[in-house]
Image: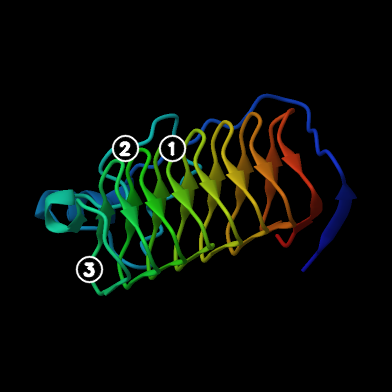
């Protein structure tokens, strides 16, 4: 396996930012949708790097079936998918075997450990890092104060920020003005012209 590593204060690659989104594709994903099932661990049909729109159903196909956190509370440990509602703050760690969505302006004042996917919507914040068994996506202006570890792909959309390192088993894409204050490791790493990485970039693919 070829490994490449570069050290740059500011990384700039020619070309436009990679359009990204989250949708289900293929027969397996269609079957889940028809049956009304949620996301399945290890489902390769989901990726942040496939399409030009984020599907509101991703990564939890039916948010009504998820554990909804609609008022400020403390630590959570569950097997269910979890949705932190808009403007709600969780004061503690969040651990789940399923997927996690932080809606707009939601905050987890702790660590997020998810067996499946993690999505931070616009202006959402995690204060102590993310570990996910599958994909991780940060929407516009979302932020993570800590490291991001993912078993799949990682997407940072415009102005999203990780105050730590990114280590992904899949691919990593940073869109316009996205920032990472540590190292970035992925099968491939693609950066918009104005994306910034203050650390090493390593491609393992």
Q: Secondary structure at mark 2?
A: loop
The residue tagged with tag 3: helix, strand or loop? loop
Residue, disc 3: 80
Distance CA(mark 2)–CA(mark 3): 20 Å
Within 10 angstroms of label 1, few (less than 14), some, or many (20 or more) residues? many
How far apart are the alpha carbons under marks 1 and 2? 7 Å
Q: Are marks 1 and 2 in contact (CB under 8 Å)?
A: yes
Q: Nearer the viewer, residue 196 or 153?
A: 196
Crowdedness of circle 2 by 10 Å Cα count: few (<14), some, many (20+)?
few
Q: Earlier in the sequence, mark 3 or mark 1?
A: 1
Disc 3, disc 1: CB below 8 Å?
no
Tag in front: 2 or 3: 3
Against 191, is 63 above or below? below
- Tell me if I can see residue 62 in this picture: no
Instruction: For the N terminus, give its image quadrant.
Output: bottom right
User: What residue is drawn where x is 61% and y is 34%?
Assistant: 175
The circle drawn on residue 146 is: none
Q: Is residue 117 above or below residue 13?
A: below
Give me the residue at 53% from left, 62% from top: 128
User: How is the protein colored in the picture?
Assistant: rainbow
Judged left or right of residue 43, residue 14 is right
Along the line of sight, which residue is nearer the eye, 172 or 94?
A: 94
Q: Is residue 45 visible?
A: yes
Which mark is nearer the camera, 3 or 1? 3
Which x, y percent locates residue 185?
Answer: 70, 59
Which of pointers 1 and 2 lies earlier in the amino acid sequence?
Answer: 1
Residue 194: quadrant of the picture: top right
Residue at the disc numbered 2: 55
The answer for how far apart the CA atoms under marks 3 and 1 are is 24 Å
Q: Which residue is mark 1?
A: 21
**x and y percentages locating residue 155 in the rendered image:** 54, 45
């Amino acid at each position: 396996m070829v490994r490449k590593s570069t050290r740059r204060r500011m990384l700039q690659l020619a070309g436009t930012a990679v359009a990204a989104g989250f949708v289900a594709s293929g027969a397996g994903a269609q079957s889940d949708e028809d049956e009304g099932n949620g996301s399945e661990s290890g489902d390769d049909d989901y990726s942040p790097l496939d399409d030009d729109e984020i599907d509101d159903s991703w990564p939890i196909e039916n948010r009504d079936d998820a554990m909804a956190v609609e008022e400020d509370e403390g630590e959570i440990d569950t097997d269910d998918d979890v949705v932190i509602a808009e403007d709600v703050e969780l004061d503690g760690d969040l651990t789940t075997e399923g997927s996690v969505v932080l809606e707009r302006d939601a905050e987890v004042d702790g660590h997020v450990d998810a067996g499946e996917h993690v999505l931070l919507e616009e202006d959402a914040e995690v204060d102590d890092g993310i570990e996910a068994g599958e994909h991780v996506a940060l929407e516009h202006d979302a932020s993570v104060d800590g490291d991001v570890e993912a078993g799949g792909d990682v997407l940072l959309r415009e102005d999203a920020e990780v105050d730590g390192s990114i280590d992904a088993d899949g691919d990593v894409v940073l869109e316009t003005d996205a920032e990472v204050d540590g190292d970035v490791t992925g099968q491939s790493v693609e950066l918009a012209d104005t994306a910034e990485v203050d650390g090493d970039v390593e491609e393992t693919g």
